[in-house]
Amino acid sequence: MDLSSPSTNPTYSSPAITSPTTTTTAITTLATTTSPSSTPSRYENQKRRDWNTFCQYLRNHRPPLSLPMCSGAHVLEFLRYLDQFGKTKVHNQTCPFFGLPNPPAPCPCPLRQAWGSLDALIGRLRAAYEEHGGRPEGNPFGAKAVRIYLREVRDFQAKARGVSYEKKRKRPKPRVTATPQSAPAPAESSAG
Ligand SMILES: [Zn+2]
């Protein structure tokens, strides 16, 4: 047997390592040009957590509560329940530090949820309620009692903590829809 000896195999300069070509993964994000500062995913996560918290509250409620049974009064109950987890010192009117933004000494006044936290929470829950099939007209987070309660909390905390919660806008215009008018129309209001 004559074993055919392997002939001189030509050495190929083969590129063994396949260099990773620049694969550009085209991630087409939705146009979020309107709000570049706020990250929507973080808001969504917070909203989901808030919704879970509220649903858990309903499950633990005595007597038991289901979502369709939920009214504005129950939302107020929920907000007061959350106060025990608050971290904002809100002075009683009898406290000597009532109205002081930076009290010089500790006092036995309770810790509460800050108005800004509650206001944002209600906004998220209101949206979540409708995302979970709730009807807008029956939305307990949009109930008048809830709005009144939030306003009262804001006003009282502003007084108690000596902090102004006034926003930049002065005229309360609740329903600002996108007006198709392009002209600015600098009309100076002479008479209200
Ligand atoms: Zn106090």
Image (spheres, helix red, strand yellow):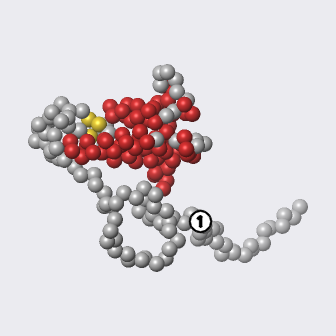
- Compared with residue 108, is residue 161 higher up or lower down, i.e. above or below? below
Q: Is residue 53 visible?
A: no
- Could you tell me residue 114's position as x and y percent? 31, 43
Closer to the camera in the image, 17 or 82: 82
Closer to the camera in the image, 36 or 3: 36
Whether residue 176 sits left or right of residue 22 in the image: it is left
Look at label 1 and name its amino acid.
Thr
Q: Residue at x 49, y 39 (%)?
A: 140
The image quarter containing residue 151 is top left
- Could you tell me residue 32's position as x and y percent? 51, 64
- Compared with residue 141, is residue 27 higher up or lower down, i.e. above or below? below
Please identify the quadrant where the C terminus is shown: bottom left
Q: Residue at x 40, y 58 (%)?
A: 173
- Could you tell me residue 119's position as x and y percent? 38, 46
* Label 1, residues with CA under 10 Å away: few <14, some 14-19, many ≥20: few
- Could you tell me residue 182's position as x and y percent? 49, 76
Q: Residue at x 89, y 61 (%)?
A: 1
Q: Is residue 90 visible?
A: yes
